[in-house]
Image (spheres, rainbow, N blue to C red):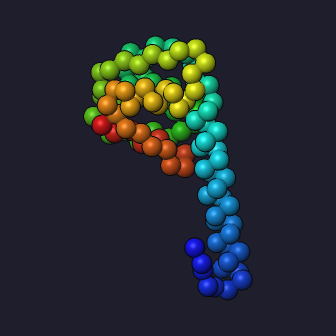
Amino acid sequence: QVLLTSPARAARERDDFEQWRAEQRQTAEKLHQPHESVHYPSVAEFLDAVSRTHGLRLLPTEEAWESPASLSLPAGATLRQGLAGLNALGLRWAIRGRSLYVLR
């Protein structure tokens, strides 16, 4: 992307981009962190644990939050693997910044 602007605005744009890139890097690191190896009797309990252990703000739809499906994670599973378990239950997820969105 090419932006014709003043030097001051160009500096702000670079700073904003670097901040965005740092957030993306932090998100990628969170996805590779180990998650508790445990059985969750509901999706809501799994998401609550994710929020507590990984510091993500939860934004699930009501349908996703109330899903009665259970989820089990093997020892050493990463957050990404746990979230992939949601895909297997027919749920979709996305992380943007510090927020985790989950929907059916």
User: Picture coordinates of residue 21 (x, y %)?
Assistant: 64, 56
**Quick check: 66 left or right of 77?**
left
Q: Quadrant of the N terminus?
A: bottom right
Q: To which quarter of the image does residue 67 belong?
A: top left
User: Picture coordinates of residue 40 (x, y %)?
Assistant: 43, 17
2 over 53 or under it: above or below: below
Q: To which quarter of the image does residue 78 belong?
A: top right
At 60% from the left and 50% from the top, the residue drawn is 24
Q: Is residue 24 visible?
A: yes
Front residue of this view, candidates 92 and 42: 92
Q: To which quarter of the image does residue 19 belong?
A: bottom right
Q: Residue furthest left?
A: 63
Q: Is residue 48 visible?
A: no
Front residue of this view, candidates 25 and 97: 25
User: Picture coordinates of residue 80 (x, y %)?
Assistant: 53, 32
**Quick check: 66 left or right of 79?**
left
At 49% from the left and 44% from the top, the residue drawn is 95
Q: Quadrant of the C terminus?
A: top left
Front residue of this view, candidates 101 and 87: 87
At 45% from the left and 30% from the top, the residue drawn is 84
**Quick check: 82 left or right of 43?**
right
At 58% from the left and 35% from the top, the residue drawn is 31
